[in-house]
Amino acid sequence: MLKVHFAPNSRAGRIIWLLEELSLPYEVNNMAFHPSDLKSDEHRKRHPLGRIPVLDDGDIRIYESGAIVEYVLERHKNGGLKPSTDDASYPDFLQWFHYCEGMVMPPINTIVVQTILLPPERRDETALGQAQRLLTKSLAPVDEALEGKEYLIGNFSAADIMLGHACFMSNRMGCVP
């Protein structure tokens, strides 16, 4: 059975969302988003940097949310959440699948650091402003891609899970411009 090492307000939410969409059985190891759990010796055996998500699939262990999503789609079933490589929508699927971590998450990470994680005396208003402007620019192509349609490639896909989770979390953390 698949086991997801999970903490709230993290990219592990993508994995739960994917597994639910695919109706795959799984169990969850709920962890606190706190160094006492994430930096523990036990968890560092799962991920050397003490990060989440981590997925166990029998003897296989994999981390990084995008890699986990790709792994599940290839090894278990894709449930129509990934077009075949010869499908006309495949290039757009790849682009949007990776766009999230390449373009949307970096400014969100900076905003979270500058508004939540750092103590007020260490926050950098210039870095925060730059990240907010970059997030606005990075979301503009997403708005264009979604114009007149509900999903990025026409039908619901894992690209929507990747990007949708980032948008959900950025809104929840107050990052949305």
Image (spheres, helix red, strand yellow):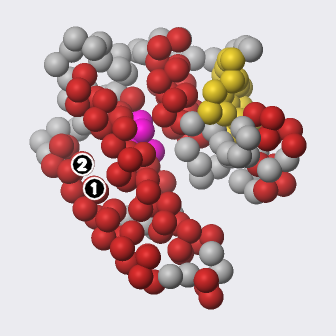
Q: Main secondary structure of the magenta part?
A: helix
Direction right: furthest residue: 41
Q: In the displayed structure, does residue 131 sit left or right of residue 67?
A: left
Amino acid beneath label 1: Leu
> Could you tell me if the residues under marks 2 and 1 are in contact, i.e. CB atoms within 8 Å?
yes
Which residue does the image show at 53% across and 74% down from the upper left? 114
Q: Please state, as top left, top right, bottom left or bottom right, where the N terminus lies in the image.
A: top right
Q: Please state, as top left, top right, bottom left or bottom right, where the C terminus lies in the image.
A: bottom left
In the image, residue 162 lies in the stretch drawn in magenta: yes
In the image, residue 94 lies in the stretch drawn in magenta: no
Dot 1 crowding, Cα within 10 Å, few <14, some 14–19, many 20+:
some
Stretch of the chain drawn in magenta: 161-165
Dot 2 crowding, Cα within 10 Å, few <14, some 14–19, many 20+:
some
Which residue does the image show at 84% across and 54% down from the upper left? 36
Q: Which residue is mark 1?
A: 139
Please provide percent x and percent y for residue 176.
Answer: 37, 64
